[in-house]
Amino acid sequence: MKIQLLVIDIDGTLLNPAGEITAYTRAAVQAAQQAGIVVTLATARRYFNTVQIANELGLQGSIILYDGALIVQHPAATILKSRPLNASIGQEAVEILVRHGIQPVVHPDGGLAEEIWTGPAELDNLSIDAYFAANVDRMRRMPYETLCAGHPDPLRVVAFTEERAIEGVLPEISALDCSWNTIKRGNYNSAELTVMDKGCSKGSAVAALAGISGIPLQAVMAIGDNNNDIEMLKDAGWGVAMGQASEGVKAVANAVTASNWEDGAAQAIERYVLRCAAQTASNSLNRATCL
């Protein structure tokens, strides 16, 4: 089926390893828009640090944020849909993390104020320090026992720590009535754990957005590279994994493109969305092609 909705992950997919959108990738995205295809982003990021990227691409429409827990209309900056985590389950997740010596971070469902709630500094680590330094004006500390309890349902609970520490809490986290995902290394140079409402994922948000837009899932193409992209790659009509993705991510995709340092997202857009013929004179297309 012809692609009508293109959903692109940001980090590791749209951005190259230097954190930039290359001219080639920007041109491919804009060509898709000019062809009448709805283009959106699906990211673990929040709105405030996604706006610049959306503006750079000239996107107008809905953006999937917080790993699928929030959908925001851009550039109007209005919330289309939120899917918060039950506060009591969030508090259980907080308590599990604290018992294991991991600093919990809560993202409350407070509109686009996008505050960050966390506990006393005793459980901070270097990755947490970097995260807080980048968000100092949005951060609030409070007692662990009230991070979720007594407040409206939050969007998610997250943690930044060593991979081994996250593996240690997964048996208890997976016993909760929730959804969760992990990545081995995120933007703050640590492994990450995200706890959300049961059934919530980038995939569920893509399905919701497609339904609102009147687009069948078979006409959706999603591109991603990490564990938190798995559900949307599975649920979309055509899922494309980046070349540097793990074997587990590649296994659920319909196709594998080149890596993000080889403009893999642009290549996938050209091949599967625009169906452009590769030109042998193009250095970018000579490096690696979609499988």
Image (spheres, grey):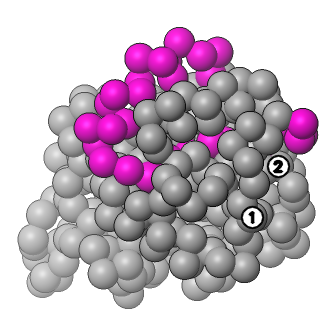
- Secondary structure category for the residue under label 2: loop
Determine the image quadrant of residue 142: bottom right
In percent of the image, x 20 and y 54: which residue is there? 244
The answer to whether residue 179 is seen in the rendering is: yes
- Looking at the image, do the residues carrying marks 2 and 1 touch, with CB atoms under 8 Å apart? no
The answer to whether residue 254 is seen in the rendering is: no
Q: Is residue 166 magenta?
A: yes
In the depicted structure, whether residue 138 falls above or below residue 162: below
- Distance Cα–Cα, label 2 vs label 1: 14 Å
- In the rendered structure, the answer to whether residue 4 lies left or right of residue 23 reads right
Q: Is residue 217 magenta?
A: no
User: Which residue type does callout 2 highlight?
Assistant: Asp
Q: Residues within 10 Å of mark 1 (few under 14, many from 20)?
A: some
Point out the frontmost of discs 2 and 1: 1
In percent of the image, x 83 and y 65: which residue is there? 112
Of residues 77 and 265, the one nearer the viewer is 77
Can you identify the residue that label 2 sits on?
Answer: 109
- In the rendered structure, the answer to whether residue 213 lies left or right of residue 181 reads right
Residue 20 at what x, y percent from top left? 39, 82
Of residues 78 and 135, the one nearer the viewer is 135
In percent of the image, x 90 and y 36: which residue is there? 150
Can you identify the residue that label 1 sits on?
Answer: 140
Residue 291 at what x, y percent from top left? 17, 46
Q: Please report the bounds of the magenta region as a residue range.
A: 150-178
- Secondary structure category for the residue under label 1: strand
